[in-house]
Image (cartoon, grey):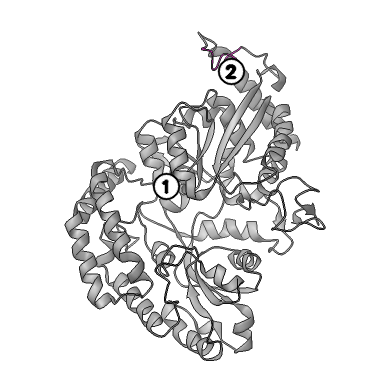
Amino acid sequence: MKRSYKTVLAVTMAASMLLAGCAKSPDNNNAAANQSPKAGDSSSLPPYEISWVFRGATQKDLNLVAEEMSKITKEKINATVKLTSIDSAAWDQQATLMLSGNEKVDLIYSKSATYSSQVAKGQLIPLDDLLKKFGAEIIKSIEPDILAASKIKGQTYGVPTVRDFASFAGIVMRTDLIEKYKIDTSKIKSLNDMDPVFKIIKENEPNLTLVGPQVGGTSTLDLQVSASVDTLGEGLGVLSNLDELKVVNLYETPVYADLLKTVRRWYLAGYISKDAATSKESGYDYIKANKGFAAMIKGKPGNDVVISQLTGKPMTMLQFTPTLSTTYSITNSMFSIPKNSKNPERAMMLLNLLYSDKQLINLIDWGIEGKHYVKKSDNAIDFPPGVDATNSGFNLRQGWMLGNQSLSYLWVTEDPETWPKMTKFNKEAKKSKALGFTFNADPVKTEIAALTNVVNQYKMGLETGTIDPEVNLPKFIAALKSAGIDKIVIEKQKQLDEWAKEAK
C-alpha cells in the first residue's frame, strides 16, 4: 500500500506538471481539465468525470459500483468515474456510433476485430507518451513483447488487459459420466481419440447431445481451428505453420479438410445435434440442462472450474494442441483512449490504477463487499447469504477484460494458484512468428465483405458436420476464390513481409 501511495503521488505530481504546461486557450469542454494545479497533491488537480465504456451485460447496481470506485479515484486522482456497459450483441454498432460522433468517451474497450480500423480512422489516440508519464504500473505489469504486440506502425493505441495471453484447443467433459463409465482420459490426445468415448456415452445415454461449441451461434470446430493457427485477424489468410511467415488460405489446407471429416463422422453417428448449424445454444447450455456431455473450448488454466460453475456440473478439461500466443490473443481485450476524450491524461491515470489498485479492480470485477460478495479469506470470495448469480445486482464476471486480472479475488471454488499458473502458462506458450503484426484490412475491405457472405453460406454447415465436405468443401473453396480470397492472401503477405523487415 505504501508503494502504491508513492506511485500515485508520483503520478499526481507528473500530472500537475503536464497540466500546468498545457493550460493554453482552453475551450469550453476541457477548460477545467487544463487549469494549472498545485504540484504535490491530488486535490490540486481540477475535478473531472472519467467516462469509461466497456462491453458487458446490464448490471442493476452498476451506478452503485461506480460511486464506490469514485471514492477511491477522487482521493487518488481527483476524478469520479461514470461506467457505461453495452451488451455484446449491440457492442459493435454502439461503439462505432460513439467513436464516430462527438460523444465524450475517455476509456473504451477495444478488440482485434475492429482495432486497426479504428486506428486508421483516427478514432484512437497514441498512448506511448501517456504511458511513459502516467502508466508506470501498466508497464510494470505487462511484459514488453506483450505490450508491443498492440503497436501499429510503431505506436501504441491499446493497452492489453493482464489475463491469459495464449490458448489451446481442447474439450471439457462431464466428470460424473467419465467416472460412471470408467473412461481413461489419459489415452485421449486428439479430437479423433474422442470417437470411442462418444460411442460409450451414446450407447448408455442416448438422449444426450455429445459435443457442442463453447459459444452459441458458433460452429463445433470454430475454436479448434482458431486455437490451432495464427488467424492474422479475420482468418481469411492464416499462418498454419507458426514457424514461418507464409500466409495461406486456411480452407485449402489438409488440416482443415481432416477436421471436417472428423466432425462429419460425428454428425452421422448422432454425436452432434441435427440443428447444430442453426441453434443458438452452446454446449454449456446443453450440459446445464442435463442434455449434453461435452463442449469444445479455447483452453487456459482454471477453465474447467469456471465452466463447472457455469454448468453446475463438475467438468474435466483436456488439451489437444500446443499452447499458442498470437497478436489476436493479446489484442482481443484492450482499453484505448478515444480522440473524443476531454482529458487523456486523467484517463491514463485511471487506467494505471486498474493495473495496480486491488481495491479498485475488485470493485469493477465483483462489486461491493458485503453486498455482492463476502471474503472467505485474504483472496477468496463467495456470495453473501441469500445472494446468488440469479439475484445479485452485480455479477459481471469479466475480470479478463477490466485491467490487471491477477489482482482479482478468486471464488472459493477456484484453484488458489490460478494466477501463478496463468503467469507460467503465458511464459511457456509458443509465440507465433507474427506476434505483433496487425493486418490493415482497408485495401481489401470490398473483398472481405464479399468473402464474409461466402463464409456465412458454407462455414456452419461444414464445421458442424451437417453437410458433406466431400461435396461442399470444393464448392466452398471455389466460391472463396471467386470472391477474392487470393487477393487478401497476397495483400496480407505483402503487409507481413513489410512488418518483418521493419521489426528487424
Q: Is residue 78 left or right of residue 471?
A: right
Secondary structure under the numbered disc 1 in the rendered image: helix
Q: CA distance from mark 2 to mark 1?
A: 31 Å
Report if residue 419 lies within the magenta region.
no
Q: How many marks?
A: 2
Residue most extreme to the top:
25
Which residue is painted at 53% across and 56% down in the image? 426
Residue 224 picture location, percent across and down: 42, 67
Q: Which residue is mark 2?
A: 33
In the image, is residue 74 above or below residue 201?
Answer: above
In the image, is residue 24 above or below residue 109?
Answer: above
Q: Quadrant of the N terminus?
A: top right
Report if residue 30 lies within the magenta region.
yes
Secondary structure under the numbered disc 2 in the rendered image: loop
Q: Which residues are magenta?
A: 27-35
Is residue 245 among the parts visible in the rendering?
A: no
Q: Which residue is mark 1?
A: 112
Which residue is painted at 56% across and 18% down in the image? 18
Task: Report which quarter residue 185 is drawn in.
Answer: bottom right
Which residue is painted at 42% across and 38% down in the image? 96
Residue 345 picture location, percent across and down: 56, 25
Neighbourhood count class around disc 2 (C-alpha, 10 Å): few under 14, some 14–19, many 20 upward: many
